[in-house]
């Protein structure tokens, strides 16, 4: 079931400053509009969902024209109630911020049963009315300049990229007592990014925006392929000649809870990784040597004790950040610990 909730939206995009200036110093004309795509499921917390919605709408300097939320199967009563009155709730928040003209159109798609993130996002894409679509996770926080930074890089006037992501910064805790953690930077683009993609995912999924047509040309998110639907999508795009890019600034705060590193390990995760690498090898995305290297590294990482995995991951990320920062035109900036009043959480 689809519920199109009109929350006073005008059908045009509202940006506080146009045109926006990207990290490369180019003046790019803003696009006519864009959609934000989010999925929720039974395991989502209401307070996290509210924060994710606020940060990707009211708090953005460049507000989306449409917010599409896919309910992937039944959700707790409190979350359902929030979705039912989302348009009214957002209207009130924009009024409090005195941004009446900026309220986006709200589309809530309710799927009868949970079929996984890939299926939910594919269904949501069909309801996105704009060519440019930004992803947002239901428990992360988008920093205020996120869309103003990445959407112009997809603008048809620029004509350069099909998918744009950014660095992300880990955080844990609630809104008031959070702890900011490590920043994860990825290569900017070109050969360094393509080479990196043969070893690790080249984009942080919660940070990306893309051209809907580019995603649909390769068949959308791969369904029924385990937990790596995003990495498989990036592979399809790269093999199809799509243009991928990352900006150095961390534009998304990525929530990491106490069990995050434990969930990254174990035989089940390694088995899924092995299947992924076999798929890459069969598609010609990686060579036999790269396949052996990737499987060996993943076996070590996934099967080591959780404490060692956490230490090793953080150390490796720090080293990689130094190398990846050099592929960008500017030094990466790290958001200050400013709290909610400063739009960081």
Image (cartoon, rainbow, N blue to C red):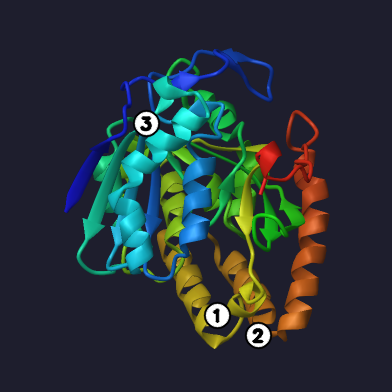
Residue to which mark 2 is pinned: 303
Q: Which residue in the protein does label 3 denote? A: 104
Residue contact between numbered discs 3 and 1, judged by CB atoms under 8 Å? no
Residue 231 visible in image = no
Task: State the image coordinates of residue 243 (x, y, percent, origin top left).
Answer: 50, 35
- Badge 2: residue crowd in 10 Å (few <14, some 14–19, many ≥20): some
Residue depicted at x 39% and y 42%: 89
**Which circle, 3 or 1, is nearer the viewer?**
3
Circles 2 and 1, Cβ within 8 Å, touching? The answer is yes
In the rendering, which numbered label is found on residue 259? none
User: Which residue is tagged 1?
Assistant: 270
Q: Is residue 143 left or right of residue 133?
A: right
In 3D space, how far apart are the residues under numbered discs 3 and 1 (Cα atoms)?
A: 41 Å
Q: Residue 42: name its quadrant.
A: bottom left
Q: Is residue 82 left or right of residue 255?
A: left
Q: If the image is split into quadrants, where does the N terminus sit? A: bottom left
* Disc 3, SS: loop
Q: Is residue 53 left or right of residue 141?
A: left
**Position above or below: 65 against 286:** above
Disc with the residue nearer the chain's start (2 vs 1): 1
Q: Earlier in the sequence, mark 2 or mark 3?
A: 3
> Label 2 vs label 3: CA separation?
45 Å
């Amino acid at each position: 079931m689809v519920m199109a909730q009109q929350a006073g939206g005008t059908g045009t995009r509202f940006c506080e400053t146009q045109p926006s200036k990207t990290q490369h110093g180019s003046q790019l004309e803003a696009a006519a509009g864009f959609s934000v795509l989010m999925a929720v499921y039974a395991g989502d917390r209401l307070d996290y969902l509210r924060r994710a919605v606020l940060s990707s709408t009211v708090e953005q300097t460049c507000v989306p024209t449409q917010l599409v939320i896919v309910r992937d199967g039944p959700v707790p009563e409190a979350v359902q109630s929030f979705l039912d009155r989302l348009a009214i709730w957002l209207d009130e928040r924009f009024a409090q911020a005195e941004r009446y003209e900026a309220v986006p159109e709200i589309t809530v798609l309710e799927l009868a049963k949970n079929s996984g993130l890939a299926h939910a996002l594919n269904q949501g894409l069909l309801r996105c009315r704009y060519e440019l679509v930004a992803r947002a996770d239901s428990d992360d926080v988008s920093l205020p300049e996120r869309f103003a930074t990445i959407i112009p890089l997809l603008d048809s006037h620029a004509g350069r990229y099909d998918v744009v992501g950014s660095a992300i910064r880990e955080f844990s805790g609630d809104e008031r007592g959070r702890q900011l953690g490590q920043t994860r930077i990825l290569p900017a683009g070109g050969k360094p990014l393509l080479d990196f993609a043969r070893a690790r995912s080249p984009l942080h999924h919660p940070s990306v925006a893309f051209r809907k047509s580019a995603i649909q040309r390769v068949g959308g998110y791969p369904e029924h392929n385990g937990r790596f639907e995003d990495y498989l999508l990036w592979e399809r795009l790269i093999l199809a000649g799509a243009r991928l890019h990352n900006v150095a600034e961390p534009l998304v705060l990525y929530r990491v809870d106490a069990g995050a590193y434990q969930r990254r390990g174990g035989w089940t995760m390694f088995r899924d990784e092995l299947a992924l690498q076999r798929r890459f090898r069969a598609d010609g995305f990686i060579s036999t040597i790269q396949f052996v290297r990737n499987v060996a590294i993943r076996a070590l990482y996934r099967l080591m004790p959780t404490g060692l995995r956490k230490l090793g991951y953080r150390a490796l990320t720090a080293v990689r950040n130094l190398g990846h920062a050099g592929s960008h035109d500017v030094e990466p900036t790290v958001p200050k610990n400013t709290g909610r009043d400063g739009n960081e959480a």
